[in-house]
Image (spheres, rainbow, N blue to C red):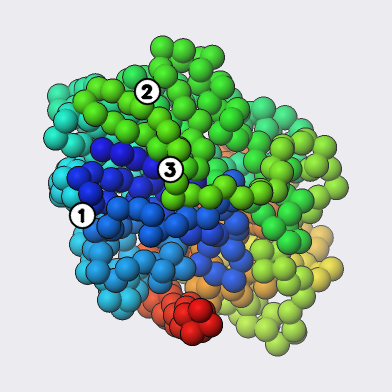
């Protein structure tokens, strides 16, 4: 079994003259208007790979599920997806003419002589459709990638019984510190590194790898957002790999570099470079605490001002609909707000707020917990205990199901909690769950189809030019 690292969390598997892909990204992360160049930059030559039988897409986040990449793939291959993927994703892939196969926990399937076993992880609100995957071949070689999951205790036991000693494991650097924390707290990046080091040690303790390759964190910002490259990536793979070598020296660690190819046979591994990737110049992402000074959260869309008419529609959504959506999709947040109301904190209003930012103005709405409606907050009132601020243009885009909400949350949304002992700021991410494809499959399918039509039209034009 030969495995080529494609960058970020993409992999190519070869066995017996056949091959398949896992989470491939051609050039950029993102299905919406904003696309983040893959980093380090490289060009894939799919024609240099063995004939392609299948593609596995682990889950629906845009750094794994790429519409642009799907359009470029041969339509004869099968697409394997999680049975927890949304109806929008499943239907959009089928629309392209692919045969869609859905896999479930503890199931197995074989592609070109490689057996793939699906292993569940701990439930994750942000990634409820993700499983870990174990690849095995006839020589006894094995490769385990947890992708974005955290190991479940039952899976530790399953691996100990069925595959206790693997040839190579994959540690994903999946930690993303929202930009706001990096801007507001001088020590946040050192805390981030401590958190990631703890995750790494937990990975070592649970999976007991003998060899591990580090992947993830493989994108950069461009255009007006390029300054974020020096402020956002506080835990890069080079730092993590070196820290892993220092803290867990009994494991043989590899820093994943695009084009790195692992040949696995039984318990042995050899490493060389694939000819199917061309490495290109990449922007610098060297983290600098000073780069954070004076930065603000710019809108994800790049649009700081929308018209009064469009803003009014957003205000009506917040006033009349958003409270009911919180009740349905943010149960932990609503429970903690309930107990907060019972504590009688006089210095804050014990409720949730939404601040809409448009140009130089802000309009703040506070939740009436009983009626589940938002009302415009008086300037002289005590501040709401918890809440978030979002640019109006960004909220408008999310309402139209034209972007992945967590990409916007990490880079452009400001959250606050004046009562962290009762409600941590991280809990507020629940307030955005309704904007995901899991709960809005109809709207996202409409967007996916529109985007696919654009990509297919571009592909036809490009083919005619050639």
Q: Earlier in the sequence, mark 2 or mark 1?
A: 1
> In the rendered view, does 303 fall on the left or right side of 45?
right
Classify mark 3: helix, strand or loop.
loop
Circles 2 and 1, Cβ within 8 Å, touching? The answer is no
Q: Nearer the viewer, residue 374 or 219?
A: 219
Q: Which residue is mark 3?
A: 274
Can residue 99 be seen in this snapshot?
A: yes
Comparing 142 with 408, the one in front is 142
Position of 305 compared to 441: left or right?
Answer: right
- Report the mark closest to the observer, 3 or 1: 3
Instruction: Tell me the residue that label 2 is attached to.
Output: 211
Give the alpha-carbon distance from disc 2 to disc 1, as whole Å.
27 Å
**Residue at position x 41%, y 12% in the image:** 250
The first of marks 3 and 1 along the sequence is 1
Which of discs 2 and 1 lies nearer the camera? The answer is 2
Estimate the x, y position of residue 346 in percent, counting from the top left: 70, 46
Q: List the residue tagged with mark 1.
A: 103
């Amino acid at each position: 079994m030969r495995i080529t690292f494609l960058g970020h969390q993409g992999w190519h598997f070869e066995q017996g003259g056949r091959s398949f892909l896992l989470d491939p990204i051609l050039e950029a992360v993102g299905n919406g208007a904003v696309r983040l160049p893959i980093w380090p930059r490289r060009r894939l030559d799919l024609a240099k790979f063995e004939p392609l039988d299948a593609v596995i897409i682990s889950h629906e986040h845009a750094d794994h599920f790429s519409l642009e990449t799907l359009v470029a793939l041969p339509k004869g291959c099968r697409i394997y997806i999680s049975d927890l993927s949304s109806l929008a994703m499943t239907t959009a892939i089928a629309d392209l003419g692919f045969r869609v196969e859905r896999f479930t926990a503890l199931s197995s399937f074989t592609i070109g002589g490689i057996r793939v076993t699906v292993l569940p992880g701990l439930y994750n609100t942000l990634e409820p459709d993700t499983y870990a995957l174990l690849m095995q071949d006839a020589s006894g070689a094995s490769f385990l990638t947890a992708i974005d999951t955290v190991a479940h205790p039952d899976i530790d036991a399953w691996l100990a019984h069925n595959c206790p000693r693997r040839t190579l494991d994959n540690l994903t650097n999946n930690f993303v510190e929202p930009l706001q924390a990096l801007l507001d707290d001088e020590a946040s990046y050192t805390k981030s590194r401590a958190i990631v080091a703890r995750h790494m040690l937990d990975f070592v303790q649970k999976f007991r790898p003998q060899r591990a390759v580090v992947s993830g964190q493989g994108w950069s910002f461009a255009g007006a957002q390029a300054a974020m490259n020096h402020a956002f990536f506080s835990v890069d793979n080079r730092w993590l790999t070196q820290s892993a070598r220092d803290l867990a020296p009994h494991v043989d660690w590899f820093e994943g570099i695009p084009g790195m190819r692992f040949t696995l046979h039984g318990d042995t591994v050899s490493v060389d470079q694939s000819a199917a990737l061309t490495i290109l110049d990449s922007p610098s992402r060297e983290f600098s605490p000073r780069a954070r000074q004076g930065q603000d959260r710019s809108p994800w869309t790049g649009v700081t001002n929308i018209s009064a008419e469009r803003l009014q529609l957003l205000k009506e959504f917040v006033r009349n609909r958003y409270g009911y959506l919180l009740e349905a999709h943010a149960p932990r947040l609503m429970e903690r707000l309930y107990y907060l109301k019972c504590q009688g904190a006089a210095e804050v209003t014990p409720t949730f707020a939404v601040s809409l930012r448009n140009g130089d103005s802000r309009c703040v709405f506070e939740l009436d917990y009983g009626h589940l409606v938002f009302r415009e907050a008086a300037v002289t009132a005590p501040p709401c205990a918890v809440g978030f601020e979002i640019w109006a243009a960004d909220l408008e885009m999310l309402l139209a199901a034209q972007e992945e909400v967590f990409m916007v949350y990490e880079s452009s949304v400001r959250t606050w909690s004046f009562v962290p002992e009762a409600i941590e700021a991280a809990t507020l991410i629940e307030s955005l769950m309704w904007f995901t494809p899991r709960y809005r499959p109809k709207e996202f399918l409409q967007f996916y189809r529109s985007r696919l039509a654009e990509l297919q039209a571009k592909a036809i034009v490009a083919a005619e030019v050639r």
